[in-house]
Image (cartoon, grey):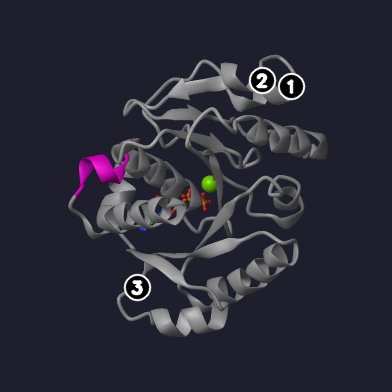
Amino acid sequence: MTRIIHISGNSGSGKSVLALNLGIALSQKGREVILVDGNIYSADIANYSDISPEVFLNEFLDGEKDIEETIVFHPSGMKMILSMAEKAYTPEKHEKLNKALLSLTGKTEFVLVDSFSHSPALFSVIDNADEMIFVTNDDFPSILKSKEFIKKIESKGTNIVGVVLNKKRKNSNKKHIEAILEKRVLVEIPYDKNLIDTVNMKQPISLVYPKSETSKAITELAKIIDIWER
Ligand SMILES: Nc1ncnc2c1ncn2[C@@H]1O[C@H](COP(=O)(O)OP(=O)(O)O)[C@@H](O)[C@H]1O
Ligand SMILES: [Mg+2]
């Protein structure tokens, strides 16, 4: 069975870093994953990965390749479909992406989508989502923006299974944030300077610093996701 999981949240909250590391953590548990950089206007998984891809999702969106021909491999062995930032806003491409995500059903256990952070684009690609994980930061403006965005997403019928509290400060209050968002916080990831170093190195933190609090939280999230299936 394939599960399509979208990772969304506001811009800059940490969706891409989380998507990459969560994909690696699921792969390390022996799960088959295709990580899709679905944020085609702000593509950054390629920049976070130490590879020189020869093919991108954009070629599928332009009708030059089949979706499966755009799969590349992360050095860890995980399958990925990478994007380059599209210059023009093109709603037809969202619809094509939506169908492509669905067409990956049966080809892998998890399709993990680093998804859009703007509602019109997001809404055109999430009717395929089995689940969504929402990433937020813990400062007050972020929480307010997240609350609004979560409400909008849920009004479309998408199942947001929980929130990842990312770049967490030591004094922020998980219970309080859960009460405001009316969502369970699945895991908390600290504001982590080592994570920024690993991003600059184009390496996943889960491989460079497996014992860090960040890697442990991401491993825990992979475990939670895995348990949902049973
Ligand atoms: N837990 C964290 N601690 C510190 N910096 C982080 C953390 N998570 C993400 N970042 C940094 O925040 C920036 C935005 O992350 P990114 O994953 O690209 O966000 P998004 O995809 O939501 O726009 C990147 O520079 C990344 O290194
Ligand atoms: Mg991103």
Is 19 displayed left or right of 101 in the figure? left
10 Å crowding of disc 2: few (<14), some (14-19), many (20+)? some
User: Which residue ends up furthest to the left in the rendered image?
Assistant: 211
Q: Are marks 1 and 2 in contact (CB under 8 Å)?
A: yes
Bounds of the magenta segment:
203-210
| Callout count | 3
Give the labeled residue for mark 2. 59
Q: Amino acid at mark 2?
A: Glu
Instruction: List the residue tagged with mark 1.
Output: 62
**Residue under the image location 33 percent in, 50 percent down:** 196
Which disc is residue 165 wearing?
Answer: none
* Displayed quadrant of residue 204: top left
Give the amino acid at mark 1.
Answer: Asp
Query: How far, Cα to Cα, is label 1 from label 3?
Result: 42 Å
Q: Amino acid at mark 3?
A: Arg
User: Residue 169 has which mark?
Assistant: 3
Which residue is drawn at the image coordinates 59% and 69% (left, top)? 146
Q: Circle 1 — which element? A: loop
Q: Is residue 46 magenta?
A: no
Crowding at mark 3 (Cα within 10 Å: few <14, some 14-19, many 20+): some
User: Which residue is pictured at 77% across the width and 53% down the height?
Assistant: 120
